[in-house]
Amino acid sequence: MIRPSLCVPLTLVLPSPSGLNQIPLILSDPRWTRETFYHEEVLEGVTKLNPPELFGPLYDSLRTGAAAAAAAAGETLPPFPECPGADADIFTWDAAICPVLETLQHMDTRARQKGIPLWQRRAFFYLERLRGV
């Protein structure tokens, strides 16, 4: 038996009255009535949101992207912090990753603006503001 409280949200999110005909099909999924399909995952508890084994590849990828964006912009990269060891805590990783990410964003912007004179970039900024008024 499907709880009535589960049917109400479905009627709110379905796009049209014809979508109401889909409710029996949607509710035929056994996960509405039994937890057995995902119960083990629930019992495992909260997943680790900061797996340190992924920070090294993330750092390397961001650094590679920043180098590519700098090359496209015709600029040189500033010095980056060294890649922390695998046993480093989240604060050390954050201190290493943030400057690389900020540089990537800056170099991406510079690469996109390459060849556009400064006065045109400034004028475009003000024209966009005037159109929004």
Image (cartoon, rainbow, N blue to C red):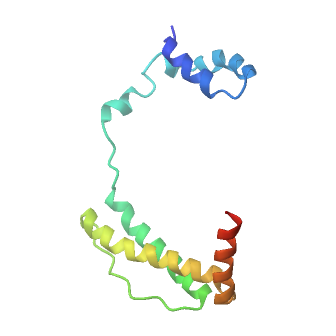
Side of 131 where 88 appears, left or right: left
In this view, the residue farthest toward the front is: 133
Q: Is residue 131 above or below residue 75?
A: above
**Could you say which is closer to the camera, residue 4 or residue 92?**
4
Q: Residue at x 64, y 76 (%)?
A: 125
Side of 43 where 119 appears, left or right: right
Give the quarter of the figure containing the C terminus.
bottom right
Q: Position of residue 92 (x, y in %)?
A: 26, 70
Query: Which of the 4 quarters of the picture holds residue 95?
Result: bottom left
**Could you say which is closer to the camera, residue 125 or residue 33?**
125
In this view, the residue farthest toward the top is: 1
How many numbered marks appear?
Answer: 0
Q: Residue at x 57, y 77 (%)?
A: 108
Q: Residue at x 51, y 11 (%)?
A: 4
Q: Is residue 127 above or below residue 13?
A: below
Side of 66 where 35 appears, left or right: left
Q: Position of residue 50 (x, y in %)?
A: 33, 55
Q: Position of residue 90 (x, y in %)?
A: 27, 63
Q: Residue at x 43, y 28 (%)?
A: 38
Q: Position of residue 120 (x, y in %)?
A: 69, 85
**Could you say which is closer to the camera, residue 13 or residue 35?**
13
Q: Is residue 76 above or below residue 12?
A: below
Query: Which of the 4 quarters of the picture holds residue 18?
Result: top right
**Could you say which is closer to the camera, residue 89 or residue 73?**
73
Q: Is residue 32 above or below residue 90?
A: above
